[in-house]
Image (cartoon, rainbow, N blue to C red):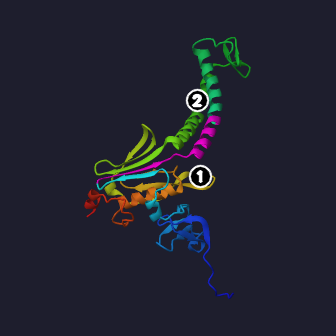
Amino acid sequence: MTGTQKQPLRYVTGVHCPECAVMIDADSMNFEQGVALCRQCGKLSNLWELSTCRRSIEELLKRPPSGCSLDATDHVFVATVSLRSIDRFILNLSVALFWNGGNFTFVTLAIAGLYSNLIGDLPAWFPAVKMGRMQMNGRPMGIGDALFVFLLLIPFVAIGIGMAGAALMNLYGKIRVVIDEFDSYVTTGVGPIQWKRRFSPRHVEAVEVGKTPWQSNVGENRLIELKADQVLKFGSMLNADQMAWLRAVLRIALRPDLYKRQASSIPELTWLTRGAE
């Protein structure tokens, strides 16, 4: 082997271009500047943007990931992604039960303290009760003590509700993107409980990968940023394949002037392309 012999490209396992899903080799990454160049499509991406999706865009569009569905005509576009994940549901439910179990104990004591001060004596069988009064540090709990404990617990209860909500999202949650000439919006939620945000499809500049302000054990979490008359951020609970699919179909539908028709199954929105002419 000579010193001038070309070395094989070195790849970073599971890292792909967010534009075309081609694997990125280590020689195309600049770790000092935090960027990577895709040799196929020429996109320059931040390292945190790199996708862990292992399927090409063409393959994703031809065979959508589990939980992804598209209902589109030349007038209305509806993309739906299920957030159902049994593994995440079990994990979030376990954490929520543990957390809220502790919260329940202290909230019950705080309510009992308020009851004994404002309404009347507590039953003798109630824990930590002496002569009908809730006890705290060996003395009757005053109304100030009860209020202090109650207010102190509010953020812990809010976190517990959020954990329970995350578990519910992992069982029944959905993300739905509707693109219509007169009403376009993104909804995230469970059943009738939905967070709905509207946007103007004619003002969409880009559909990009963004990052959440929080981090997990595997690093910064990713989400989809739809940049229109306002920036909508959603999809942080999607897996890599689902996020790549949803981003691809939205880019094809919303920016037909920039992205070629990669799948005949995605009709062109005639009112949108007519407005862009």
User: Residue at point 63% right, 31% down?
Assistant: 103
Is residue 104 found left or right of 22 in the rendered image?
Answer: right
Q: Which mark is residue 151?
A: 2
The residue type indicated by label 2 comes to Leu
Vertical position of residue 154 compared to residue 270: above or below: above
User: Residue at point 43% right, 42% down?
Assistant: 195
Q: Which mark is residue 215?
A: 1
Could you tell me which secondary element the residue under label 1 belongs to?
strand
Q: Which mark is residue 51?
A: none
Task: Write down the region rendered in magenta.
Answer: 75-98
Vertical position of residue 67 compared to residue 55: above or below: above
List x then y, in percent, for residue 259.
38, 66
Mark 1 or mark 2, earlier in chain: 2
- Viewer-side residue, 88 vs 211: 88
Is residue 230 in sight in this rendering?
no
User: Residue at point 51% right, 63% down?
Assistant: 55
